[in-house]
Amino acid sequence: MLRGLTAVLTVVPALLLGARPARADEGYGATVEAIDNAFDQQVVRIEPGRSVEWTMAGNAHHTVTADDGSYDSGDLAPGSGFEQTFTAPGVYHYYCRYHGSPGAGMIGTVVVGDVTLPGPAGGVGPGREPPPTRFAPIVRVPQDSPTIQAGVNDVRPGGMVLIAPGIYHESVVVTTPYITIRGMDRNGTILDGDLTRPNGIAVFDADGVTVEHLTARRFALNGFLWSDVHGYRGSYLTATDNGDYGIFAFASDYGQFDHSAASGSPDSGFYIGQCDPCHALVTDVISTGNAAGFSGTNAGGDLAIVNSEWSDNLAGIVPNTLDSEANPPQHDIVIAGNHVHDNGNVSAPTLALTYPAFGVGILVTGGRDDRIVGNLVEDQPTYGIAVLPMLDRNLWTSAGNEITDNVVRRSGLADLALGAPSAGGDCFADNDHATSQPPAIQLLYPCGALRPFPGGGGSMAPTLEALTRYLDARDGTFPHGDRRTQPAPPPQPSMPGDPAAVPPVPAIPGENVPQTYRIHPVQEIRSAPGPTVSEQIAVAGVPLATSWWSLLLGLYGYILPFVVYAAWVAVAMWDLIRQESAAITHRARWMLIVLAVPFLGPLLYFAFGRSPIPRQLRLVLTVGAIAIYLVFVLLGVLFGG
C-alpha cells in the first residue's frame, strides 16, 4: 500500500489530463463502454480467440444482443459488465434490445481478424484502399437521397455527398473510401444527436474521406470521427456540445483539421492520437469552452499544431502519454504560432479526471522531443507552458522537449514550468517570460549550452499542483459545467467559393493531406486584453490553495521532506563535529557520506556511524519524521476524496 501511495505522491496519476479508458487490455481483445443510449466504440477489431468486454458506464440498463441471436447478455444494470469471446474471423453485429434493433439505434460491430468491414462500395480495411482515378457523380441530400446516411451509402469513391441546409437527426457511418461529404451552409447544415445518438459522422476503415462545411452538435460521443484510416480531412467544420470529443482522429495517419471550431466537449475539442508517425496537421482552428482545447494520446512523428486559437477551455493544448493506448510515449509534435489564452474556464464541461490540467496553456505530460516554439500564451491561472511526468502502468518522464521563443505572460503560478521527475534534455531558451518553476529555468535547463542538470530534474511543485486537483475531483464536487447548457457558438466563416460548384476533394495521403504550412510569427499574433489573471501567492512553488487539505498536501508533500532532510544533515554534521574523542578520519569519512549521498547519507550515519545520540531520539528524528510525513499526506488523500 505504501509503495502505491508513494507512486501517487511522486508523479501525476495515470488518469490525469484527459486520459481515456483503456481501449484494449492484455486480458481482452477490446473494451466497450455502454453509456446512455450509445456504445462508445461503434466498431472494434480484435484477433480470433480474444474477447470483448462491455461495461455499463451510464445510468440506464442495457443489453448486448447479437443480431443473429448467437449471444445475449440479458439485463445489464449500471456498473455491471458482459464478456464474449470470438473464435472465428468475421464481422459480428450487435445491439441493445432496450435502445435499438438490428441495424438501428444503439448498435455496434465486432470485426474479428484481418477481414474487411462491409460497405456499400465493397469491403474496407485492414490495409489501404487505392485512390480513385476519376470523379464520381454527386449525390444530393435530400434531392437524390432522403438522408445523409442514404447519400453516403449511394455515393461511389471519388464522388461527393452534397447536403442542403437543414437539421438532420441522424448518426452517419461511413465505410466508402475517398468520398467528400459537404454541407451547403456551414452554419445551417446541422447534424443533431439529440443527446442520444453516438457520433455525428463516423468514418471507419475508409481511407481518404473528407468532411467539410457543416455542423455536428449534441451527440453522445463525438461530432466527427475518423478511426483506422489512411488519409482524412476535416475542414470548415463546427462541433459543439458533444459528449466526448468534437473533432477526433484515432489510429489514423496522413490527415488534416483546418478552419474548424469545437466547443462544449467534456474531453477535448480536437484530438489526434495513437499514431506514429501521424503525418498530420491542425491549423487555423478555434477551440473554446472544452475541457481541453487539444488532446493527443501517444501522438507523434510529423504532427503539427499551428496557427490556431485555444481559449476559454479548462486547459489549452495537452499532448500526453498513456500505456492504455498503443505507441507510447507521445513524441515529436510541433506546437507553434498559436494564441493560447484564458484557459481556466471552470464552466466548461469537464470529466473529473481531466480537472488536474486546469489552467495550463500548453501542457506536455510524459512527452519526448516535442518543440514548443513561437506561441503567445497569456492569462493562464496556473502555468503558461508546463512539462510534467505521467504515471500509467509505466512511469513516463519527459525528455528532450524544447520550449523556445515563446511569449508567456500573466500566469497565476509560473509562466514556464518543468515538473519532477524528468529524464533530461528538456530545455528552455529565448522565452519572453517573468516567472518560472523552478526559478531561473532558462539558466538551469538551457538549450544548446552546458546544462547544470543534464540527467533531469525539475520542481515537484507543478507535479503536486496537478495531484491536488486530482484529489479535489475525487468526490465529484469539483467546479465544472454541463455540455447541455453551454452557450451556442457564434456563426463561423464559410468555405471559399460556391459549395455546389467546388469539385470534391478526397484526402489523398501525401498529395493533398497534410498540406504545407507557414507558421505565424509570434509578433504578428494579436494579444488578448489583459491583465485578467493575478499571480497566485505560493510558498516554494506551492500555491496557498483554497482547501485546507490541498495546502496540507502541498506543504507536507513538497516542502516537509526537504526541511526534514536539511535537519538530518545539520544534526549529523553537528554530532560529528562535537565527537572530539573520535578519530578525525572517522568523522571526515562520515561527513563526506552525509554530504555526498542525498537523503540516504544522514540515514546511514544515524544507523551505522556510532552516533552518541540516544537510539530512541535517532528513531524519532528519522523513522518518526517519515511516518509523520506519510500520515499527513494520507490525511490529505482521504479528506480530499
Image (cartoon, rainbow, N blue to C red):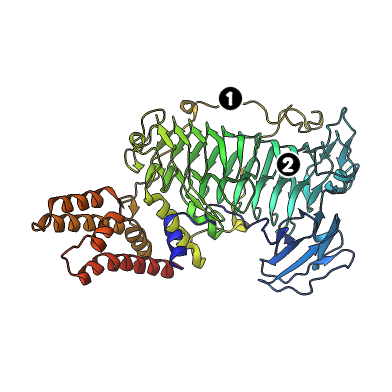
Q: Which residue bears the numbered disc 1?
A: 518
The residue depicted at 36 percent of the width and 62 percent of the height is 553
Q: On the picture, is 89 further left or further right than 589?
A: right
Callout 1–callout 2 Cβ contact below 8 Å: no
Q: Which of the 4 quarters of the picture holds residue 606? A: bottom left
> How many residues crowd mark 1 within 10 Å: few (<14), some (14–19), many (20+)?
few
Q: Is residue 234 visible?
A: no
Residue 214's label in the rendered image is 2
Check the image and report above or below for 502 versus 347. above
Label 2, secondary structure: give it. strand
Q: Position of residue 105 (x, y in %)?
A: 81, 60
335 and 114: which one is in front?
114
107 and 450: which one is in front?
450
> How many residues crowd mark 2 within 10 Å: few (<14), some (14–19), many (20+)?
many
Residue 37's label in the rendered image is none
Marks 1, 2: nearer the viewer: 1
Q: Which of the 4 quarters of the picture holds residue 564? A: bottom left
Identity of the amino acid at label 1? Answer: Arg
Q: On the picture, is 112 further left or further right than 485?
A: right
Instruction: Please tell me which of labels 1 and 2 falls first in the chain.
Output: 2
Q: Position of residue 193 (x, y in %)?
A: 73, 55
Check the image and report above or below for 575 versus 340. below
Q: Position of residue 400 (x, y in %)?
A: 48, 37
Identity of the amino acid at label 2? Answer: Leu
Q: Which of the 4 quarters of the picture holds residue 407? A: top left
561 and 359: which one is in front?
561
The alpha-carbon separation of the residues under discs 1 and 2 comes to: 26 Å
How many numbered marks have been drawn onto this rendered protein structure? Answer: 2
Label 1, secondary structure: give it. loop
Q: Is residue 354 visible?
A: yes
Q: Position of residue 263 (x, y in %)?
A: 60, 47
